[in-house]
Amino acid sequence: MTGMDYKQAGVDIEEGYRAVGKYKEFTSKTINKKNADAVLNGIGSFAGMYSLKEFFLGSTMEEPVLVSGTDGVGTKLDIAFKMKKYDTVGIDCVAMCVNDILCHGARPLFFLDYIACGKLDANVAAEIVKGISLGCMETGSVLLGGETAEMPDFYEAGKYDVAGFSVGIVDRKKIIDGSKISEGDILVGIMSCGVHSNGFSLIRRVLPDLNEDFGGIPIGLALLEPTRLYVKPVLGLMEKIEIRGMAHITGGGFYENIPRMFKSNFTAVIKEGSWDIPPIFSRIAAGCFNAGCSGSIANKLGSDLLKNDKKMKDQMFNTFNMGIGFVLAISPSDLVITLEYLNSMGYPAYEIGLVEKGDGENSKLRIV
C-alpha cells in the first residue's frame, strides 16, 4: 500500500523539468560576445556566477560599485491571465528593475527571476521567461538564473506571480545621486509605452471589460503594452552629456518619483501641456469617474476631466506615468543635444519642466 506522493499533493516535478528545459533556450540567448567570459555557469546549478574580473583588471573604472534593484509585475498579471497573453509581462519584470538601477547611472549586468504559481504549466511559464529574456537581451543583461515555485492551495490554479532583481555596475565617481542638480536645471521627460506596470489595482476596477474596443484592439491588449526599457538610450546619452539626476516614473506617479532624484531641497516645476498625454489615461480617468461608460463617450469624458477637474488630474498624476516614463535633470546648455539624441534613438523626449529652489524642508513637485 502506497501513500500520497508529491504529484498527488499538487506539485508536478516532471512539469517543472519540462519548464526548465524550455527556459534554457531563452537564457542562452542573453549571453553574447561581451558577457560570455563573465558567465561561469548555466541555469540548473544552485546559484548563478558572474565574474567581475574585467571591472577590476581590464576596465577603466577606478572603484566599481554594484547597484541592485528588485521589483515585480504586480496585479498587471491579472490582465495577462484574462487575456491569455503571457509574453509581455516578463519584459515588465526586467524593466521595472533595470530602469530603477539606471537612475543611478548603473549598467545592468545580470538578472534573476522568481515565478510562483498554484499549478505549473510549462508552456505558460516558458512564455513568461521568454519575455524576461527579451528584456535582458535589450538591456545587455544575462539571465543568470531564477526560481520557479509551484505552491498548490496557496495560489489559484492559472495564477502566477512574477518578480526579479537586477545587478548592475557603475564607477563610484560616476554615480548619479542628484548632488549635482542645481536651480534652473531642465527636466526632460522620455515617453512611456502606456501604463507600464503601476496602478493596475485601480485599473482593474475602473476598466472591467477588457474586450472593450480601444483604437481597434481590445483594451486589455493595450494595457499589456510592456514597460519601456530606457537603458540603451540613457547610457548612450551619458557618454555625451552630464546627466545630473534621473527618475523612473513608477508607483506614485510624478508627485512621488520626480522629487526622489533631488539630494537637496528643490521643487520640480512641471509644465502642463508640454507633451501629449496618451488616450489610455483619459480612458482610465473616465472609468474612475464612471466605470459604466465606454467608447468615444468615455474618451471625451476622460479628456475633459484631465483638463478641468483638478482633483482628478492630481489623482492621475499621483498614480500613473501619464505618458512620461523616465525623467532626466540636465543643464540648460545640454537640452538641444539631449532631445536630438533621444529622438534619434526612437525615444520621444520633451522639455517638461525645470528645477526651482525649494520652499520647505522636503523636495516637492508642482504642475503649472
Image: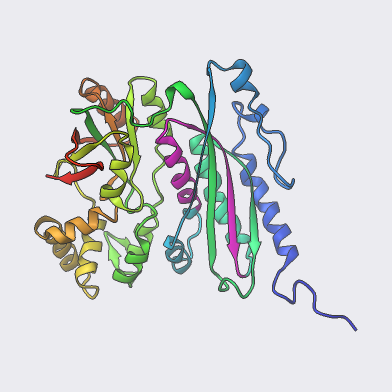
Q: Quadrant of residue 216?
A: bottom left
- The residue located at (52%, 44%) in the rendering is 134
Q: Is residue 60 left or right of residue 193?
A: right
- Nearest the viewer among 110 and 132 is 110
Which colour style is shown? rainbow
- Nearest the viewer among 291 and 220 is 291
Q: Is residue 109 magenta?
A: yes
Location of the N terminus by quadrant is bottom right
Q: Is residue 10 above or below residue 131?
A: below
- The residue located at (36%, 49%) in the rendering is 250
Residue 335 horizontal/vertical position (percent): 23, 25
- Nearest the viewer among 340 and 56 is 56
Q: Is residue 250 left or right of residue 155?
A: left
Q: Can you see residue 325?
A: no
Location of the C terminus by quadrant is top left
Residue 207 horizontal/vertical position (percent): 30, 69
Q: Quadrant of residue 240?
A: top left
Q: Quadrant of residue 116?
A: bottom right
Residue 35 horizontal/vertical position (percent): 61, 29
Q: Is residue 81 left or right of residue 116?
A: left
Residue reaching furthest to the left:
308
For the record, the magenta segment spans 90-118
Q: Can you see residue 229?
A: yes
Q: Is residue 213 magenta?
A: no
Q: Is residue 140 above or below residue 255?
A: above
- The residue located at (14%, 62%) in the rendering is 300
Residue 93 horizontal/vertical position (percent): 49, 50
Residue reaching furthest to the bottom:
1
